[in-house]
Structures are given as structure tokens and as C-alpha cells.
Amino acid sequence: MLNVDKLSTDIVTAAGVVHAVDRVSLSLERGEMLGLVGESGCGKTMLAMSIAGLLPASGSVVSGSIVLNDRDLTRLPYDEAKRLRAQNIGVIFQNPTSALNPRMSVGSQIVEALNPEDRTSAAGADRKCVELLGMVGVPRPWDRLSDYPHELSGGLAQRVLIAIALARNPELLIADEPTTALDVTIQAQILDVIDRLRSELGLGVLLVSHDMALVAERADRVAVMYAGRVAETGEVGEVFRNPLHRYTAGLLDAAPSVWSTGHGRTRLLAIDGTPPDLSAPPPGCRFAPRCKFSESRCSTEPEVVRLDNGHTYACWKPAGELLEATSAEMAPDVAPDHGAPPDGDRGQPLMSLSEVRKEFVISRRVLGIGTERRRQAVAGVSLDILEGESLGIVGESGCGKSTIARLLVGLERPTGGTVTLHGRKTAADGRGEQTAWRRTVQLVFQDPYLSLDPTMRVRDSIAEPLLYKGGRKRAVRDLVERLAAEVGLAEGVTRRRPNELSGGQRQRVGIARALALDPQILVADEAVSALDVSVQAVILNLLKDLQRNRGLTYVFISHDLGVVRYVCDRVAVMYLGKIVETGPTERIFSAPAHPYTAALLAAVPGNAKRATLEGEIPSAENPPSGCRFRTRCRLATEKCALEEPVMQNVEGDGGGAVACHFPLARTEGIPLG
Amino acid sequence: MRFFVLRLFTAMLAVWGALTIVFFALNMTGSPVALLVGDNATAEEIARLTTEFGYDRPLVVRYVIFLRDALTGQFPESLQYHSNSLDVVLERIPATLLLSGLGLLLGVTVGLGVGYLAANGRWAWSRRVPLAIIVCAEAVPPILLGVVLVLIFSLKLGWLPTGGSGSWKNLILPVTLLSVYAAPSIARVFRASIVSNAHADHVRTAEAKGLSRRMVRLRHIAANALIPVINLIGVHVGAILSGAVVTESLFSWPGVGRLSVDALLNRDYPLVLASVCVVAVGFVIVNLFVDIFIAVLDPRARER
Amino acid sequence: MSTLFNKTFALRRRQKRNRYRSGVQGIVGLALMGMVIIPVIFAPLIAPYSPTALNLSNVLAGPMTGGHILGTDQLGRDLLSRVLYGGRVPLIVVTAAVLLASIVGVVLGMTAGYLGGWIDQAVSRFADIQLSIPSLLLALVMLAFAGSSLTTLILVIALGSWPAQFRIVRAQSISLRKMPFVEAAVVGCVPAHAILRRHFLPNVMPMVVVTATLSLSAGLLIVASLGFLGLGIRPDTPDWGAMIAIGQTQLGRSWLLAVAPGVALLLLLLGVQLVGDWLADRFSVQGLLARGG
């Protein structure tokens, strides 16, 4: 159906002409899903937009062909190509809420997309809209027509976008990172909808994603892009089981998986460096500068090798059968990890939360008008942070995990309960003491771009907390250089400004700044989720090294269960402001006791027992009575609505605790499948 | 509803604040009586007037009395016209409303048109020429423009009267001049808003629907781009009201602006007070309507 | 292959031209400003005659006659000298006023934005209310009763322009307060005054400068309007606004009387505006909090 041949796309930027897509060929049949993976900046979105005809004004297709049903879109007149695309291609985007016009109702935005014959009468058009919304699983579609985009959740908005994309019965759906902005449970729901449409309507799907596991689970075939070119393509199972291009192999090694049990034993195999500047790409194999296996012939362009099973790759020194040997080769790189220290070292709570609550006032009564609205971000959480451990806190967005991080470092004050450090209450302290306790708990931020002041040199950012601790200029400067070296910043980098650094370098700076005060506890709030998988691996390795060398205690807040499994000894699962389960990582991942934990795990791509959790997290303004998870739980009974479950110990397997009236026994597994 | 009531409350607060500022601006800058009577008044005369106007009372008392009188519409008698100064001002309101209304209408129309062209012109020059016009128009001092208009259309060509009122011809020059107080900045904001909106995510969605370029531009870019323009209409109305003072004086138009300048130059203190209060209250009311209009246009604004 | 080359080439050329143009805009603006400001500052050295020397035997002389480059006014004073001297009051008043307004606006804006709460509410309300009186009217009221002097003019103009600075700085400070790099400083126990100085001030500065150019234009127009309405400084001090008002009465006989000071004001405004646009462009390209690689 779709055949792209030697397609090249250029983008003009202030820095020069970027060859975003360079002689890329691929094909897609009806009912098939092709996954397009790669790190950010590798050209996958530009390729998708070239096909969809939605390139920015500064970009254009400069050569090659896009053949859709035997007609070459690049050679047709503009209007004809546009009409053809409108009829046959539907597109959905990464940020569903901003992809809808905030000024127009949902209904009118779908109507716009309908075929003229469906729009002859207002009532008929509305019926068609409702039909489309029903098809993508929007509950009560009639009520949604008059809603505005800001009233929709991310998941609902993405469903509306899919409805818009389907309005003219296209044959091809281009999905550009459709679930990146969504929670893992909502991601699974959206992908289920796409899967169903694929089989029901025979839709061909081009799925653009950075998430290898997701593509592995959902797609039929995969194309791995690097620096504007396709590095490797083939059947999903074949490519991921037996990657041949070194880049594919590297990406697969770099991602910590929820399903591997190698926790605490292995280091992630990171890919050093960053993708090349596409305005002047390196000659030959573009991955060569970052490739551990590159040799002299890699400076000439590798031939595309095509195997019998359709698996093609462009690499001079493919992995494949050599994989075993390479691991051995790499062995010196793998620092021996001492694993978790024996339990005797632990047990001392360094920091404790006791019945901590945090409410935010959303709107107040003004002059007696309106109602006061409060959101309970944290609704009574008790948690010990033990010395030397890595505690993971997981849950969907809006569950309160970030608020916990902010409470721990003192950016928020609890509205109830106490936070104690070394057994002393923190909130009630005077100013001097407050400074002292704050210094022992430091925070690493999520967004490496916003966590550094753009007007300040990097070394001044790192030095800042030291200067106000009363450090001498000279001593501070030396300490900054030592910290920079410790987090792996090259010499000279500290003299630069943030906009001259890559995302990974900035995150290293953020870590150095957090370490400057020599804290005992490091709270990492989604510290690697904004990074590409190769950089993420580097930072995770760094964090592990730092913990070992400095004896740090980590609180690791993340929505990425793979990362948590890799880093953490112990996990706390949160739902709607409450902790529903705690326990050792291995036990939580292998034998979850709370139905919510089980559902969360089931939604992660790659799970053999795939199951989707229905519905969305309820509003924290008005949480359900009793057990807060009961509205989405299949095991819920009347008791769950009446009685709030208390934490009870879990037997065996390292224990932990769970707040559920009907905890899952080990053998029960996931109740949703 | 909640939005409406709150907005009404802030409007009332603004009226109170405006009256307060005017009162203190007048009273903190010296005793009005000395200014009222002129340089050659006797001490007895000053003392008499001071008691008559109540200036011997404490400031706070006078403030309370002033507020009470202002709310009931009882301003002191105008010294020039010898009648309630509020009535004198209200009599001139229609003339000012006519001029400012037409000026605003013309300014908004021209501003939106030029701004749209500057953002959407087909060729580079058809975007650049309107943009250059906007930049130059913003730099032209309105008083210079007024003088030049009179020079060309009244004195050299003799087509239009130099001032006064009564015929539609009297309106053309003042309305044109007034529109210049709003049009260039409306055009600039609208253009910038269109340009930044053109890159919004939802525009890509609209393009993906296969809508015509015209449809995308009007419905998804320009209509959304109007919101910041309307947000600023309040500011433009303020500019036009300021402009009306100059324009009415320049073209001898019998409106509130000229009235207040004359009152100032003739030291008719009660009349100045009344006219400034009326203008401030009118301005607050206009802003109230603008906000309600925005709430109708932009669904997100209603929630605030 | 030739199409590829052509397209790439065309794109490159367009891009080069754009960068060139935006730089030129700033230079032209600065040149225009200099063209007006420098002669006005050095008026005592440059001006051929005294701006107030009457010569009733040579009134309303045409340009380039009797050593008067722009001719003379209705009292026989040299027009060029008057135009040069006439810019001094507006320039001094507006520069001082904008400086004052910017300092007040930045201090109040940063404090209100950082602290929030009732302080923020109080100052914001006050700014709102003040904006509910058109600035020229407020100036009229105050000048009429305080009398026109350099100081009162400066205060009146500053009072009219501080709310704009305040609102912009406040809005930026509110978003800065939520920025991770500011929170990092808070977590790092950096005191509030240091956070304001080290993080807020450098980050709001570009917008402050751009806003100041806007206030400069607005202030020049208000001073001119006040002069035009007869509320400027003493009538014998030359002042562009007042000169235009007098020129208006002589339009039938010598239009240059009104147009010459008007054009000087126009050139100055155009220069300020081009420089302001150029600064705004530059800063937003670099990005206040831009992401870049």
C-alpha cells in the first residue's frame, strides 16, 4: 500500500540545512503495523511528517518517492496530493491536549474532518461523530461533543484525535509517539484501540516511538533509524532477538527492562556520545563515532545487507552470532557490583513520613461565592527511608509521588502529619536548623533543560549552594572541579553555559549541584525520564556508582518501572495520594499483592500476560470512599466501598505490606487477563 | 456566574480606586482654592471659598464626602457653566462616544486587516510592506499627523473643514486621527499572534484533516489569534480616550476631552473632577464588557 | 539531483538574508536615535542662534533665507535652533522617568512575583486601578494642580509607565519561581535575596529592556501631547509639543513651523521602535529560557 523509496527531507535552521531524512526506503501493507524507532533527533518524526505532508514550512522533501496505492505523492500536483493524503492518511500526535484547537468544541473539530457526504445535515454529522467516538471507546460520546479540549484528560483527547484521524476511513494511520505523554495504563488502552482498529478496518499503522519494548510488543515489523537513515529493518521478533546493527544492539542493551531479573548485578551497557549534527553528518557509517566496534572501513558507507527472511541492516561489523563474544569483550567495562548490602546494614530509618498529608487549594470562596475546592495530593502517607537503600516510588501521574519528593526536600510543607529526619521533626524547626536538615536532603530534577539557569555558567550553578554555606572562594572552586570530575564532566565543560551542553551533560551538572552539599539522601524526581535511552543508561550507571562510592540513600521517583527495577531495592506503589503496597523490588515485580500493582505491571509493554486496566485515575478532589482503587478494581466488593483497607504484612518472599481487603496470593497472578 | 459576579466586583473596586486616585491626585498637590481664585485674590476671599468648598475640614472627612457625592452624582457646581458639573460632562458624552466609537471601529478594522496581510501575504514583499507600514505608523506622533491632515485636506485641498462639528465632513479627519491611536498596535499584536499560532500543534491536526489552506488560516489560526488582540482592546480604548483629549482640542470637537482641557486651563476644578471621574468609570465599564466578551470567545477564560 | 541542489541553495540564501536583515534593523534604529539625540544634547554647541532671541523684523522667514536653515517662527526666532533645544525637555524627562519606572517596576514586580500572597495582591490591584485611568488624563489632573516643572513631569510620566514594567516582571517572576533551577537554589539553601539577585534579575532583564523602549515611546508621546495642550513646562522653554501647537496656528502661513519639530519627534520614535523590535527579536531568538543544543 505504502512504498517509500530513497526519500530525503531537508530542514532549514539557523545553524544550516539539516538533512533530517536521508535516502530512506520502507514499505507498509494494509493491516500491518510498522514500528519506527530511534533516539530523538534521528529523523523518525520528520520521516513520518514527510509521508503525511505535514512538514514545517522550513522543511521539504528534496528527493525520492512516496508511493501510496500506486500514486507517487511527491510527483502529484499540490492539491491532488493533498486530497489523496486527506482521503487515505490519518495522523495522530504526541501531545493530544495541545493537538486539539482549544477554542473549538470536540464535536465541531470532528465534523470538520468528515467527508462532505457525511456533513449534509447537522444531525447526520453529529451521529457520525458519535459513531466515531464510540469506535475509539469514548464513554458517553453524546455528552462529549460539546466538551472543550481543556476539559478532557490526555487519554480521552488522544481518543478524540484518533476519531478525527479515522473520520474519512483512511487506509494508513501515522501515529507519532502517540502515548509518550500518557501513563502506562492509558498507553495500553490507546494501543489496544489502535490494535482493534487495525484488525477491524484493515488499517496500516506507522507507529513512531522511542520505546523499543512497546514496538516489540505491538508492531509486526520494525525499522530502526539513526541519524536520518534506516540502520536496520525486519520482522519485530527477528530484529529484537537477533539485532545485527550495532546501534540496535546498543539500544537494546541500554534499556533496563521490567522483565529481566538481573537487578543489582549488571551495569547497563551505555552508548557514549550524542547523535551527529545532521547538517554535516560524518562520512561512512554514521554510528561509527559512537560505536565501540568501529574500525577503519566504517569510514566508508556500509552496504545494505538483505537476509532471506527480509531482515536488512547496514553495518560493517554486525552483531548477531558474535553477540556472546562481545559480551566477553566488554567484560572489563562491567564494574563488579557488590549487589545489595546485607540486611544488617539497613533498618535504621534515616527519614520518616508519618501520616503525612498535603492538600492544595484549587479555588477559594471569594465574597461567599463559589465553593472552596481542595485537591488531596498526599492523603496520609507513612513511609520510612532506610539508610543506604534505594527506595522507588511508582504510580500513575497524579498519584502524589512528586509531591512526596517535594515534601522530602522541603519545597512543600505538609498540611498534616510529620516528616522526621534522624528522629527529629523537620517542619517545626527554626530557620537555622531547617537549613541544616535541608542540606542533608537534595533533589535531582526531571527536566535537564529547565534545571539550570541559562544565564549562569555551569560552575557557578554547582558552586552556588557552597557559597551560601560559607565556603571560601578558592576552596569552592576546587571542590566544584572535583565534583565535576566525579560526575564525569570533561574538563572545560564547567566554564560553559547550559545551552552549550547536551541533555546528558546537563543532568550530570544537576547531579553535581545536588552533591555539592554532601547530602545523605538524594531524591531523584523522574531524573532520567526526559533523556534518551542511551543517555539514560549513562546517568543510571553514574547514579549507581555514586551510591556505592558515597554511601548515598536514594529516593527514586519514576513512572518507568524498568528503571525502578534496575535501581531500587525497595518499592512503594502509590495510588491517588496513598501508598497501596510496599516491599522488596523482586517481590513486588514477581508477586504483586495489590491488584493495582499487578495492573500497573500488566500494562507495561512486553508482559506476556498482557492485560489492560480500564478507566482513568479519579479526581483527587473527590476521591472514592473506602479503598480508592475500588472504582477500577475487578475484585472490588461492597466491603471495599465501606471500609478503608489498612496496611498489613505480606507473608514470605521478603515481605512488605499491602493495603487491600483481598490481596493477591502468589499463585493468583494478574486478575485482569 | 461565579466569573461574572467576581468580575463585577473587581470593576466596582476599580471605580472606587480610580475615584480615590483622582481625589488624592488633586488634593495632595496643593489647595485647589488658591488655584481657583487666581493670583490677585484677597486673603478674605480665599478664606471664604475655603469654608464654602469645605477645605478647612480634615482630608479624610472630605474624602468620605467626596465619595458619597460621587456615588449619588452630586458634584460641585461648575465655575464656568454654573450648573452641576456632572450634567455638563454628561451633555458632552454623546459627542465623545461618537468620535471614539468610530475611531475604535476604524482602528480595529484597519489594524486587523493590515495585521492579517502582514502575517499571510503571499509573497515576501506582500508581508513586508504591511509590516513596514505598521512600524512606521506606530512611530508617527498623532499630533504631527493631525497637523499634516489639516494642512493637506483642509488648507491645501480645501476638501474638509479644519474643525468644529455638525456635518459628517467634520468627522472624517478626527476619526482618522483617533484610529491611529489603536490601529498600528492592533495590527502588530494580531500579526505576531497569527505567526506564533501558526506553529501550534492543533494547526497541524487541522492540516492533517485535509482542510483547505484558507480554512486553516481563518478558523484555526486567525480566530485563535484574535484572543490576545481582544485581551488588549481595553488598553486600546484607554489609548483612544487619551487620544480623544488631543484630537478634540485639535479639531475643536465639543466632547469631554476638550471640555476637561478647557476646564483645566480655566481652573474650573469641579468640572475637571467630574470629567475625569466620568471617563474613568466609563473606561472601567468598557473593560468589564471586554472581559465578558473574551469569556464568550475563549472557553478557557471562563474557568478562571 | 539538480532539484535537490536548487532547493537547498534557495533555502540557504533565504536564511542568510534573514539574519542580515535583523541586524540591519538594529543599526538603522540606533543611527536614527543618534541622529536626533546627539544634536539635541549638543544643542548649545551646534545651534546657530539662541532659541529665544526675538527678531520681530524677520518673522516667518522661509527656509534657507538670511542664514536661517529652516527659517524663523512668528516671533522671528530661528526654527532650527528651537527644534534642537526643543528636544531637551522631552529627552531628559522621559529618560529619567523610564529609568525610575523601570527600577520601581522591577523591584515591586520581583518582590510580588516571588513572595505572592497579600503583598502581590495589594500591589497588583493598585497597578490595575491606576491603569483604569487613561494615562494622559491622569497626567493632566496632576499637572494642572501641581504645576508643570521638570520634576513633576518626570513623576507624572514615571507614574504612567511603572505598571507596564511591574506587570511584565511580576508575570515572569511567577513563572521563574516554579522553574526547577530556582527550586534547586531553594533546596540548596540559597537565601531569598541571593536568589532574586542571581537568578531573577538576569532572567527578567531582557524583557525589562524591551519594555523600557516601549515606555520610552509612550512617554515621548505623552510629553509631546502635554506640551501641545499647553500643559508643558513654561511657554518660553522650547518644547516640541508646544512648538507644534503654535505651528498649528500658523499653518496657513508656514507649515514648517509645526512639521519640523514633529518630524524630529518622528525620527526619534522610529529609531526607538526599531531598536526595541531588534532587541525583542534578539532576546527571543536566544530564548529567555530557551532550549538549545
Image (cartoon, rainbow, N blue to C red):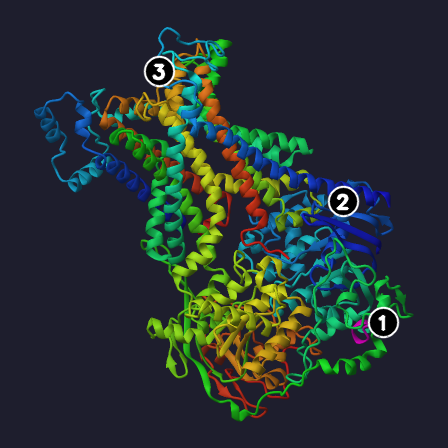
- The amino acid on which the numbered mark 2 sits, given as a three-letter code, is Lys
| Observer-nearest of A291 and B104 | A291
Q: Main secondary structure of the magenta part?
A: helix
Q: Earlier in the sequence, mark 1 or mark 2?
A: 2
Mark 3 lies on a secondary structure that is: loop
- The amino acid on which the numbered mark 1 sits, given as a three-letter code, is Lys
| Observer-nearest of B124 and A620 | B124
Q: Position of residue B97 (x, y in %)?
A: 39, 26
Q: Residues within 10 Å of mark 2 (few under 14, many from 20)?
A: many
For residue B190, above or below residue A41: above
Label disc, if present, on residue A317 of the rendered structure: 1
* Left or right: residue B296 compared with residue A1: left
| Observer-nearest of A130 and B34 | B34
Mark 1 lies on a secondary structure that is: loop
Label disc, if present, on residue A82 of the rendered structure: 2
Label disc, if present, on residue A288 of the rendered structure: none
Chain letter of the residue carrying label 2:
A
Is C246 colored magenta in this rendering? no
Pointer 3: what residue? C53
For residue C287, above or below residue A291: above
Residue plotted at (65% across, 33% down):
B121
Q: Are marks 1 and 2 on the same chain?
A: yes
- The reply to whether residue B1 is visible in this rendering is no
Q: Are marks 3 and 1 in contact (CB under 8 Å)?
A: no
**Splitting the image into 4 quarters, where does residue C249 fall?**
top left
Which quarter of the image is occupied by the C terminus of chain C?
A: bottom right
Q: Are marks 3 and 1 on the same chain?
A: no
- The amino acid on which the numbered mark 3 sits, given as a three-letter code, is Ala
Q: Position of residue B269 (x, y in %)?
A: 23, 27
Q: Residues within 10 Å of mark 1 (few under 14, many from 20)?
A: some
The span shown in magenta is A239-243
